[in-house]
Image: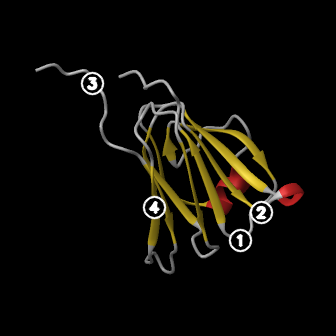
Amino acid sequence: MQNDNTPYQNGAVIFWKEVNNTGESQSLTLPDWGSGEAVDKSVSGEFSKIAMSDIPSATTITLSQGTGSGKVYIKLKATHQPASLDRTEFQYLMDSYTVGDFISEGLGLTLVEKEGKASRAGIDCHVQLSKAPPAA
């Protein structure tokens, strides 16, 4: 039996609607690592917290609100294999970090782009996986 150390678990981005630390969630399951595929999900403004698990290295995650000149967004890049993010308010991410910062609520995520100020509007999520499989 040969072991090539290839991970077989897909990552996920999870959106939480919380009141007093309870509430429903919606998730976006990522395609296979190294696929180069992109996936998208939109959630209503009630879903204000985000968590991530098993995000492949070199993946970019763009979280945005609005369109055109009023678009607000933050773009994160996974720099660790696998990267993760503890349950965190979208508004907190927008208000607390600048380009180049590592996100302290997670492991292996850095902020690469940011524009605008978050509101309680819905969140659009775009995830782009790298075409090359991450090194083990």
Number of numbered labels in the structure image: 4
Residue 74: image location, x then y, percent: 70, 49
* Sequence-first tag of 2 and 1: 2
Mark pair 2, 1: CA separation: 8 Å
Give the residue at mark 4: 27
Residue 134 location (% of width, % of height): 43, 25
The single residue placed furthest to the right in the displayed view is 69
Badges 2 and 3: C-beta atoms under 8 Å apart? no
Q: Which residue is mark 2?
A: 66
Q: Residues within 10 Å of mark 1 (few under 14, many from 20)?
A: some
Mark 4 and mark 3 lie on one chain; the one further toward the N terminus is 3
Pointer 3 or 1: first along the chain:
3
Would residue 2 be found to the left or right of residue 78 on screen?
left
The disc at residue 5 is 3
* Structural distance between the alpha carbons of marks 1 and 4: 18 Å
Q: What is the spatial separation of the Cα atoms under label 3 and label 1, in whole angstroms?
A: 41 Å
Question: Which of the two marks, 2 or 1, is nearer to us in this view?
Answer: 2
Camera-side residue of 106 and 131: 131
**Circle 1/circle 4 CB separation < 8 Å:** no
Q: Which residue is mark 1?
A: 121
The answer to whether residue 44 is above or below residue 105 is: below
Q: Are marks 4 and 3 in contact (CB under 8 Å)?
A: no
Q: Is residue 87 visible?
A: no
Q: Are marks 2 and 1 in contact (CB under 8 Å)?
A: yes
The answer to the question of whether label 3 and label 1 lie on touching residues, with beta carbons closer than 8 A, is no
> In this rendering, does residue 131 appear at all?
yes
Query: Hey, which residue is sitting farthest bottom in the picture?
Result: 19
Q: Percent position (x, y) of residue 29?
A: 43, 53
Residue appearing at x 40%, y 39% in the figure: 32
